[in-house]
Amino acid sequence: MDKKLGVYICACGGNISDYVDIEKVKEAIKDEDCVLLARTTMFACGDSNQKDMEADIKENNLSGIVVASCSPKLHLTTFRSVSERAGLNKYNYVHANIREQASWAHSDNKQGATEKAIHLVKAAIAKARFAKSLEPTRIKSQKSVAVIGAGVAGIKASIALSNMGDTVYLIEREGEIGGKLASLGKIFPGNVKGGDMVERLNAEVKNDEKITLLTNTKIKECSGNIGDFKIKLQETKSGESSPDSEKEINVGSILVATGFESYNPNVGEYGYKEIDNVITLPEFRELLKNGKEGKNLIFKNRKVSDIAFIYCVGSRQVKGENKYCSRYCCSAAMQSSLDIKEQFSDIQVYHFTKGVRTYGAQELKYAEASRSGDIFIQFPDKEEPVVYSEKGQTLVKVKDILSSKKEVEAAVDLVVLVTGMVPDSDKSVGSLLKLPRGRDNFFNEIHMKLRPVETVIDGITIAGTCQGPKGVMESVNSALSAAVKTHSFVSKGELELSPIVAYTDANTCEWCGACSEACPYNAISKNDIGGKTVAVINKTTCKGCGMCLPVCESDSIELTSFTNKEIESMIEILAN
Amino acid sequence: MTRIDPKFGMRLKRYGAFDYDACYNCGTCTSVCSLARKGEEFPREMVRYSVTGNQEEILSSLKPWLCYYCGECSTNCPRSANPGELMMSLRRWLTAQYDWTGISGLLFTSLKATIAALIAVAAGVILFAVFMNFDTEAILKYGHYFEMAAISGVFAVILLPNLIRMWYFTIIKPGFKVPIKSYIVALKELFIHMFTQKRALGCDDNQKRWFEHFILVIGYLTLLFTTVFLDWFGTSSLPVIIGGYIVSAIVFIVTTDFVAGRIKKSREISRHSRPSDWLFVIWLLLMGLTAFIVRVAIDTDILKDSFWIYMIHLTVLAQWALIIVPFGKWTHFLYRSFAIYFSKLTSK
């Protein structure tokens, strides 16, 4: 073999060298075939070592690198970059994990750990011998994006994308934009009213030439992949659909911002729909707008002087499905209480909570409500308040955690159920785009912290409350974040995709469909090649996960850089 | 079950509590209280009951009496909700609840009513003197009779029934079954605490205040005994005369320090004085001082020419015996010690 390999064994400042004798590892592998140089180092990832590696590659004209250190999750990219900087194609780099897999796992057996490390490094060397230079797949990308849902998240994302120079199709199923924002009262922290904010955004969208606003529009079909999605739209004006109202757009990326729905309590949940003065928070917001008569708040022809807010209705459920906190409702209830005080001075408000979560500066709203004489009762998670009617009076009975769970009751004229957020009940967008949902039934990001707006479908990002409960500010933040990510897919007009993908051998493949079924990304399709039906893998949608390999009976699939030859050579060494 | 009563707070505020609705139940007051025992939410639970207006729980609770107001809770409260002063207010409120006449409540919440009562008593004393034609001998004699009559009358008509009401609210109504024997065994506690305030020593940095208070209680009781039973103003026994001088001096010297503390607001306890507090310490001071001066006037033989000296003393005494003792702050002397006695009976 003509490969010239450099092998580096990392001490990880003792994390590895305390249990693995790295000098012994070096001795064991330095004479392996193709190994030109072998070194130990205190911190392979340290700047100085990275520079030494670059110099080694250049001076010795190395054609492959192996670093034996921690998990590739941590430093695979680091050392690939080192190779690149030294002018070596990064796919010639092979990583061996001798920390998580040797020193940490076998800290009770130093000799065994050292032996295992030697095997792991030798296996990596074996793989490195076969490593090839690879070039990323380049595909053309449309310089336009589709934003689905014109609520606050969708609108703000569209404006941001337009400002970055992208052509935006803003698609909204309703006739008006703004979504739920319009129904909100004062929004923290600017105290701007939802309606005013919608008006402003509406004007901004309409004056923006790069945004094409498509209201009363639904998505009918979606095909294609990152850089080249084809979306069929249908206008639903006046409920009729005709072929004329259909339209197709071609976009490089899709930003989904389909929003939430308010939880709709079941009949009888805290007396809802059974006792006539039990209403939900959105219903109460309407009442605040329309129920003022003189100095009084009037509900069903009666003056309201005591109001109970029951929190966490449809959220943090002990028995129900919705285990999550809906984040906005505590603050929304506080704001509602303050709005009550502003208009009606003699209304007493009771808050029955599961523990108030007015996080961050929203705590100020809590403090203000508390100062204004509101009564807060926290009830135990599993012993929710009971709303019942007695002698024409509506009573809320509850156990107060803060007075050793003593039972107390309040007589009120109105019970407001502080309802949380649930995903939009129209599931069509999610299923057309095949977006995965989490346990909470909201759309799932890839990683909450590391990749918070991307979905497993390349080129599709999510923003706002379709991803999970959020306040307005948080929705906007996530929308801006998703806009930046979406922009990155389309900005260059070209995309680089990882070359590590699977490919089939048309000579041996006898189409059986097993691989297509196993593929989680719909990357494998049935094709006719020279009169033969075979499986063909789409390079742009394949993620190189390898799920199709073990199910192929004729062994006709290979995965770039994890070929049978490479894997077998590694196994051979490990088994010795 | 109790109905939440947000208006209770408004009523309680008339007894002095303020801003306790800033409380967010962090429990700092309980954690810094040197008297709170493990598992007890003292004093936080009383704050909670006040916020939710749970009068039933407060009325049946002895806890407010078990606090000696070191003020640590108020100093450390992150929301300046002032739990220490709340406990103080609850003691005033409870005093008003125990009092079957309702006069305590009136006097605690209305300065005007208090002043009117003081003036009425003073007018009564003057009228009495007029009626007696300012006969020094007779007035001195009846003054002495008045002392004895006031003590027994106030005790029988006001204090005893009120103590019985306290017992009913805190032991009988909540349903505690206490055998007679326990009542007798626990009597020891009652007297120890009545005379020594032992529990107050459990408060941090409280030794000086405890000592002053202890001296004052002993001094006051001895003065009461000397004037009423040993007839200090009438006696010719030298030991009694000297003893009287000493105890009356103790009373006005210690109370002077207390008054000064309230003026300087040097400690948490003296920071939020209500009219009832001023009245109590000032009248106690006046009692000691005027008694001292009266005896000085007797010994220097000027009393007959300066009869007004005795009139002032008698007025202070009458106001003390008819207003402050039955309806004012004096009652804490009884309620505190009985609270400890009762809590001994109800603890397992």
Image (cartoon, grey):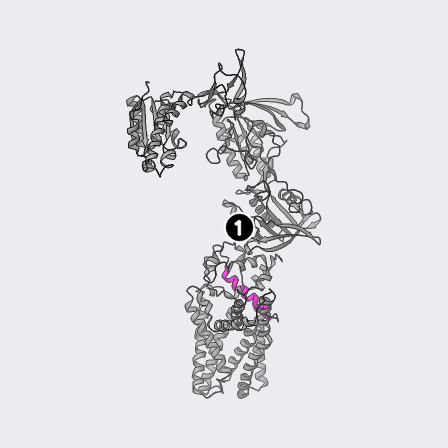
Q: Above or below — where is A154 with respect to A188?
A: above
Numbered-mark total: 1
The 10 Å Cα crowd at callout 1, few under 14, some 14 to 19, many 20 or more, is some
Rendered image quadrant of residue B265: bottom left
User: Which residue is identified by label 1?
Assistant: A367
Given the image, on which type of amino acid does mark 1 rest?
A: Ala
Q: Secondary structure at mark 1?
A: helix
Q: Residue furthest top?
A: A530
In this view of the protein, can residue B264 be seen by the observer? Answer: no
Along the line of sight, the residue nearer the viewer: B242 or B123:
B242
The x and y percentages for residue B310 are: 51, 82
Q: Quadrant of the N terminus of chain B?
A: bottom right
Relative image position of residue B83 (x, y in whole percent) = 50, 60
Is B85 contained in the magenta span?
yes
Q: Position of residue A380 (x, y in %)?
A: 56, 50
Would you say the magenta stretch is mainly helix, strand or loop? helix
Q: Height in image: A181 above or below A537?
A: below
Q: Is residue A105 above or below residue A28?
A: below
**Residue found 52% across the figure and 21% down from its top:** A524
| Residue B266 in the figure: left or right of residue B120 | left
**Which quadrant holds residue B123?**
bottom right
Q: Nearer the viewer, residue A393 or B193?
A: B193
Q: Nearer the viewer, residue A408 or A182?
A: A408
Q: Is any atom of residue A60 visible in this view?
A: yes
Q: Say which quarter of the image contains residue B328.
A: bottom right
Magenta stretch: give its range: B80-103
Q: Is residue A272 magenta?
A: no
Which chain does the numbered disc 1 sit on? A
**Residue A553 vertical position relative to residue B340 in the rendered view, above or below:** above
Where is residue A266? Give x, y as percent: 65, 42
